Image: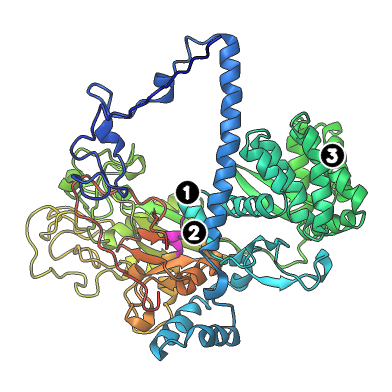
Amino acid sequence: MFGSGFGVAVTAVDLCPWPAGALSVGDPDDAGPDAVPDDAALVPPGGGGSPARLGELLPVGVRSDAELAAELQRIVAIEARLMAYKTELVAAFAARRPDCWDVPRGAAARAARDARAGAPSDAEQDATAEDGDAGAETAAGTAAAGDGPTDTVETDAGSGMAGVPVDASGRPEFIGTSEFFADELALVLNCSRTAASTLIGQAFTLLTRLPGTWAALADGRLDWPRARGLTAELGAPAAGTDPAIVAAVEAALLPTAAELSVRGLRAAARRELIGRDAAATEERRAAAERAADVTVRPAGDGMAELAAFLPAPLAAALHDTLDGYARLAAADGDARPLGQLRVGVLGDLVLRPWDTTRPPLTATLTVVAPLGSLFPGAGAGAPVGHGGCDAAGGTAPAPADPARAGRPTPAWAGAAEVNGQPITAAQLRRLLEHLDALCPGGLQAPTGGALHLALVDPTTGALRATLTRAELERLARRGCPQHPPGTRRPDAGSGPGSHGHPGSGGAPPGTRGPDGGGGPGGDPAGDCGCPVLDRPPPVDRYRPSAAQHRYVTTRDRSCRHPGCTNRAGWADLDHVVPHAVGGPTDCANLCCLCRRHHRLKTDAPGWTFTMSDDGLLTVTTPSGVTRTTRPPGLTDPAPGAPPRTPSGGDDPPPF
């Protein structure tokens, strides 16, 4: 028999050349290696403005049941390969963020770093040292509360790794990597810093301690949930275990890992680890006990979840106690659900309202009052004075901002718009009336606490001013110091507001103000439309004033770094443009940063922070990813409106 041979030739032909403008990087006429296709430019006519979806390219409706099952299994394998690739990317990214440029805490550590890298100039040292100490006047304990558990490096003799440097959580994966890499990765992935830190730990464990698991993941033989379960059991918990023992545990588990449930696989990993290293059991228990904590999480609908991580015997005893007291209350005739009774018992046992021997807890109550509520028509049944003027002094609504034409008015804004109009004495008297109507005797500060009032612009959501109840009463009583009772402003007119200022607080001629005063020659004290309240003025020193501290913490309410939720009570007031290089101590240049992110801004190279006058903070990572955060309530600018003016620029050298 004669043999035969066949040859196949394949020629690649570009049947659809790149259209003009389809390359988003590089010269549109040069489809070189740096040019990448722009998806929007490749959408076929009639394609709906977006690239084709997978469901359109691979229709699911025509597949049989077996084909659907096979496709889902193929996706699981693809996801596993992608996660293996993702861990490689994270590891490579981490390698480019070494810790050699991290600035340790303390003057001696800074001096050692400077000697290692070449000492900066005196001005640079002043900028770093002075801005790094900002916010010392904030609540005590900021340094401990603001950093989180992974912010310091120490030697933990009780972790089984005596002499081996680990962070405060006992995790060695950050050793050699910048302490701020997790913050950068969080902004790159648009996730929380906790999620980014977890991913870093998983990448470290898979690539250095569990190479067999990583290989199975990269080949699609092991799915991500099971690989993640193995890293949770053989990663940080087994940090003090001999690597040879960890490798033996991995080798024993991998052949049957895909056949076990995730929970079963983790239990098997714990059994294998205990059997091969009994000392690890006590180390894990001690580490878990050190991590005990009580946390609270919002749950929506006015509810929250109080969670306690504590030893199992103590948890069982607490639950039995709460349940026992709740059942006693139910037996006594309390008809509320048993769960609600347990919550009531918990509150009573912790707060002990009957115990008057201990000092009372203090609280700060902040009332946010949109300025629109001080104008006529702000709500149903709002009192209106003569001629459609506000009963508090004839305040007329200001004209709408043309820049916001066509945009919906926020639901909390009421019917009026302020748009930067001055806050007058008449408006403050109106606010006092609202506060006095809230409860008998008027709304007052809690016992031992404080009452802060925050006035916000109902159109933009920007904070206009903050003050205490005492300051409100004093300003409303004093009025405008430039125009005492019985006088008129030189520029007074006959238009709305009676003084030539639309929306001002003066009463029109022929009407009577809230204090019985009339129009010209009879206005109440200060009802001239002059501003008597605004945000605190700048101060000519480094330390913010008490009024600035109150204003900025009320505006920001938490750390302003993207993704951080540390509350403002534990945050520093940081100069966005450092004070040592000319940054003013002004509310437009101050923002709340927890101690960790304050140190990141001051010490980490490559990061830039800028902030607009109304508090819009823009943060750019060394890799060029930009995220913005807004103060709570601040709305987006209107389409076509001029951009917000930033008050900060690049950090001073060497950053």
Residue on which disc 1 sits: 190
- For badge 1, the amino acid type reads Asn
Percent position (x, y) of residue 575? 40, 73
Q: Residues within 10 Å of mark 1 (few under 14, many from 20)?
A: some
Instruction: Count every numbered label the image shows and give the total.
Output: 3
Say if residue 564 shows up in the picture: no
The question of residue 558 being in magenta is answered with yes
Which residue is at the far bottom? Answer: 122
What's the residue at 60%, 87% (across, down)? 108
- Amino acid of disc 2: Glu
The residue nearer to you, when weighing 106 against 97, is 97
Q: Residue at x 53, y 11 (%)?
A: 2
Q: CA distance from mark 3 to mark 2?
A: 35 Å
Q: Amino acid at mark 3?
A: Ala
Secondary element at image label 3? helix
Q: Residue 147 falls in which quadrant of the image?
A: bottom right
Residue at point 19%, 72% (across, down): 483
How many angstroms separate mark 1 from mark 3 (CA)? 34 Å
Give the labeled residue for mark 2.
Answer: 184
> Which stretch is magenta?
553-562
User: Which disc, if any, is residue 268?
Assistant: 3
Examine the rendered structure and indicate whether residue 248 appears above or below residue 160: above
Q: Are marks 3 and 2 in contact (CB under 8 Å)?
A: no
For residue 227, what is the image quadrant?
top right
Rendered position, 512 above or below 255? below
Q: Residue at x 46, y 83 (%)?
A: 130
User: How would you rate the neighbour count of disc 2 (Cα within 10 Å): few for under 14, some for 14-19, many for 20 or more?
Assistant: many
Residue 240: image x %, image y %?
81, 61
Left or right: 380 as drawn, with respect to 365: left
- Left/right placement of residue 457 relative to residue 495 reads right
